[in-house]
């Protein structure tokens, strides 16, 4: 675990550096609505863009107003300052307007060699599914044309099956953290997730197998309360470590840099047109507040995690100016409190060290209010 934690703290980790030295190409993506299996089938390394708590946004602020999400501005800063120069291209989606503004300003200032815009519907009805399937075909064709590769149906199925195995391993890790005596802290699980979305396909399974074997009999004791962390883009290990340093163990999450990226997609079809399967898997199981008329499923997903992990309280967090998660979190809070589940709702600046003291004060008060494990 120590090496995984070390590597996860880097943007361009050692696995990416080796991949690049060996002539491999890396394509970035941000939204969990992006089927990475298509990039894997093309022999590319899909890399989920992250900011890792970067708080410097001077260059980004000149191009993206400070009224935009600070996570997006932090990512843009890293794009402009050269941190992400190892990328050979990027996949843009309409996950939210802030993300689109971030990528388009990045491309305007430092044009990508390859940029493809994957359009993701806001509904998961039959007509939207057909539209998304056709857009996945354009996405596949764009990859093939630019990188001069052929993506076969057989290779797509190989990568779909591989990603299924990765999701099952991530589920195992989440089940291990949900035990009465958890095997992982919340910060460690985030490290594992970050690594699983930033290394070559063949490496993902090995890293997760290594973590599962290492922590098979590991037991964490002495924490004050079991917590679920939900909300917007949260790749900040320091934030989770801050919560856990006060005795609240994060034993479950419903984050897009976490369970929402894999848990709902565990039971996809095993045969048929692979692009139809990917369209159905990624659109119908997209648990994101950008999706219209879908709050009941998102609510049930959170409630199921609360029940499964036997949490004592829930912390809902969103980055300042993230309207979609801010509104969703209010609805979640009302639904959870109706069930008698204690909730702390936080709005914060992404990566702002000045905000840590305020966050810790509120978390400490919340832990005192809910008491210890039931």
Image (cartoon, rainbow, N blue to C red):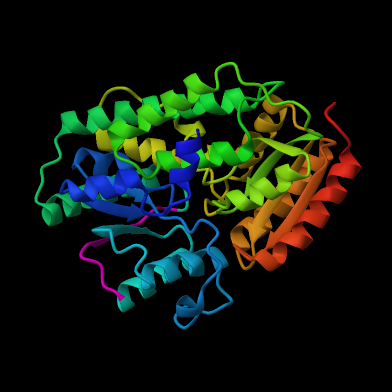
- The residue drawn where x is 71% and y is 65% is 355
Q: In the visual, does 143 lie left or right of 96?
A: left
Residue 159 higher or lower than 139, as above or below: above
Percent from the top left, x then y, of residue 98? 49, 67
Q: Is residue 288 left or right of residue 49?
A: right
The quarter of the picture where residue 342 lies is top right
**Residue 117 in magenta stretch:** yes
What is the tally of numbered marks visible in this picture?
0
Left or right of 262? Residue 83 is left
**Nearest to the observer: residue 271 or residue 367:** 367
Residues drawn in magenta: 110-121
In the visual, does 133 lie left or right of 56? left
Residue situated furthest bottom in the rendering: 62
Q: Is residue 248 above or below residue 64?
A: above
Question: Would residue 261 be visible to someone looking at this image?
Answer: no
Q: Where 5 sits versus 207, above or below?
A: below
Q: Percent position (x, y) of residue 134?
A: 26, 48
Residue at image coords 48%, 59%: 51
Which secondary structure dominates the residues rendered in magenta? loop
Q: Is residue 136 magenta?
A: no
Q: Quadrant of residue 103?
A: bottom left
Residue 11, percent across and down? Answer: 41, 54
In the picture as drawn, the residue positioned furthest to the top comes out as 217
Which quadrant: the C terminus?
Answer: top right
Foreground residue among 34 and 190? 190
Q: Position of residue 303 (x, y in %)?
A: 69, 34
Q: Is residue 233 visible?
A: yes
């Amino acid at each position: 675990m120590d090496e995984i934690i070390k590597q996860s703290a880097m943007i361009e980790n050692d696995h990416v550096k080796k991949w690049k030295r060996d002539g491999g190409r890396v394509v970035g993506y941000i939204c969990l609505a992006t089927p990475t299996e298509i990039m894997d089938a093309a022999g590319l390394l899909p890399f989920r863009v992250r900011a890792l708590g970067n708080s410097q946004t001077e260059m980004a602020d000149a191009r993206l107003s400070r009224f935009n999400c600070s996570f997006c501005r932090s990512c843009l800063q890293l794009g402009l300052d050269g941190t992400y120069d190892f990328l050979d291209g990027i996949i843009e989606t309409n996950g939210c307007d802030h993300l689109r503004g971030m990528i388009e300003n990045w491309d305007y200032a430092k044009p990508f060699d390859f940029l493809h815009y994957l359009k993701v519907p806001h509904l998961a009805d039959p007509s939207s599914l057909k539209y998304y399937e056709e857009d996945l075909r354009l996405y596949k064709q764009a990859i093939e044309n630019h990188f001069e590769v052929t993506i076969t149906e057989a290779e797509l199925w190989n990568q779909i099956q591989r990603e299924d195995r990765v999701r099952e391993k991530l589920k195992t890790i989440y089940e291990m953290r949900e035990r009465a005596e958890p095997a992982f802290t919340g910060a460690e699980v985030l490290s594992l997730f970050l690594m699983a979305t930033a290394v070559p396909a063949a490496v993902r399974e090995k890293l997760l197998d290594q973590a599962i074997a290492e922590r098979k009999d590991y037991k964490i004791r002495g924490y004050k309360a079991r917590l679920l962390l939900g909300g917007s883009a949260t790749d900040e290990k320091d934030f989770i470590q801050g919560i856990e340093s006060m005795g609240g163990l994060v034993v479950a999450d419903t984050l897009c840099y976490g369970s929402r990226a894999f848990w709902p997609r565990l039971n996809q079809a095993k045969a048929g047109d692979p692009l139809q399967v990917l369209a159905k898997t990624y659109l119908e199981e997209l648990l994101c507040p950008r999706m219209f008329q879908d709050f009941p499923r998102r609510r049930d997903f959170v409630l199921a995690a609360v029940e499964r992990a036997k949490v004592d309280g829930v912390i809902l967090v969103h980055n300042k100016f993230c309207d979609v998660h801010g509104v969703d979190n209010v609805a979640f809070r009302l639904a959870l409190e109706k069930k008698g589940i204690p909730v702390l709702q936080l709005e914060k600046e992404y990566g702002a060290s000045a905000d840590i003291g305020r966050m810790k004060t509120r978390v400490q008060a919340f832990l005192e209010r809910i008491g210890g494990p039931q």
